[in-house]
Amino acid sequence: VAGCGVYSLLPVPWRYPVSDAGSAGLDRNNRICQRKQHSKNEGRPRGSMISVIVPVYKVEKFLPFCVQSILAQTCSDWELILVDDGSPDRCGEICEQFARQDGRIRALHKENGGLADARNAGTAVAQGEYITYIDSDDWVAPQLLERLLEQAKITGADVVVCDMAKTDSEEMT
């Protein structure tokens, strides 16, 4: 994984708010905040096992690396939601190109509202049983989704989290 952050896998019945004050579902003190369980009648249509949400803004140079790393996952039961947050560069076009190439990829376009708003927009249309968020200037190891899903199933945890490794390389090795 290139960049900064921690990756997590969240089961869909639990929705964690995302705010600019903290990372997905965590408050400023890294505590899980305001989790809400949806009723069974309120369920979403089930699609892929994992919904991968990638907010996109001014990352034209990095976006192909990010998407290619998701396409290379050893776990193939996922959907990718690319949320173009009103990016002024070619990001919207790139999102559409990837969506045309692979049926598991959807491109969402919206006015710029910031990272949290883009994540929330992706979460609103997610159909997977689990959700994970990946930054558009990062790339992920081929086993990321497989390992997160495996741990979620083994442990039954509400949230599965892994660390990241920082690299200066633009090569996915």
Image (tube, rainbow, N blue to C red):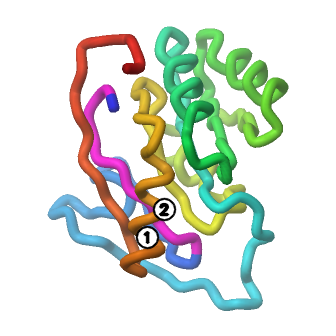
In the rendering, at what x and y percent does residue 81 appear?
66, 42
Q: Quadrant of the N terminus?
A: top left
Asked if the stretch drawn in magenta spans residue 8, the answer is yes
Residue 101 visible: yes
Which amino acid type is marked by label 1? Ala
Which amino acid type is marked by label 2? Leu
In the rendering, at what x and y percent does residue 165 appear?
23, 34
| Residue 31, placed above or below residue 41 | above
Cα separation between marks 1 and 2: 5 Å
Q: Is residue 27 left or right of residue 140?
A: left
Local crowd size for mark 2, using a 10 Å CA cut-off: few (<14), some (14–19), many (≥20): some
The answer to which of 101 and 75 lies nearer the viewer is 75
The answer to which of 46 and 135 lies nearer the viewer is 46
Q: Which residues are magenta?
A: 2-12
Residue 112 visible: no
Asked if the stretch drawn in magenta spans residue 80, the answer is no
The reply to whether discs 1 and 2 touch (Cβ–Cβ < 8 Å) is yes
Residue at (41%, 19%) from the top-left corner? 172
In the rendering, at what x and y percent does residue 83 appear?
63, 37
Residue at (45%, 43%) from the top-left corner? 143
Looking at the rendered structure, the secondary structure element under dot 1 is helix
- The numbered dot on residue 149 is 2
* Residue assigned mark 1: 152
Residue at (55%, 39%) from the top-left corner? 73
Local crowd size for mark 1, using a 10 Å CA cut-off: few (<14), some (14–19), many (≥20): some
Looking at the rendered structure, the secondary structure element under dot 2 is helix
Quarter holding residue 43: bottom right
| Residue 99, placed above or below residue 123 | above
The answer to which of 135 and 78 lies nearer the viewer is 78
Q: Quadrant of the C terminus?
A: top left
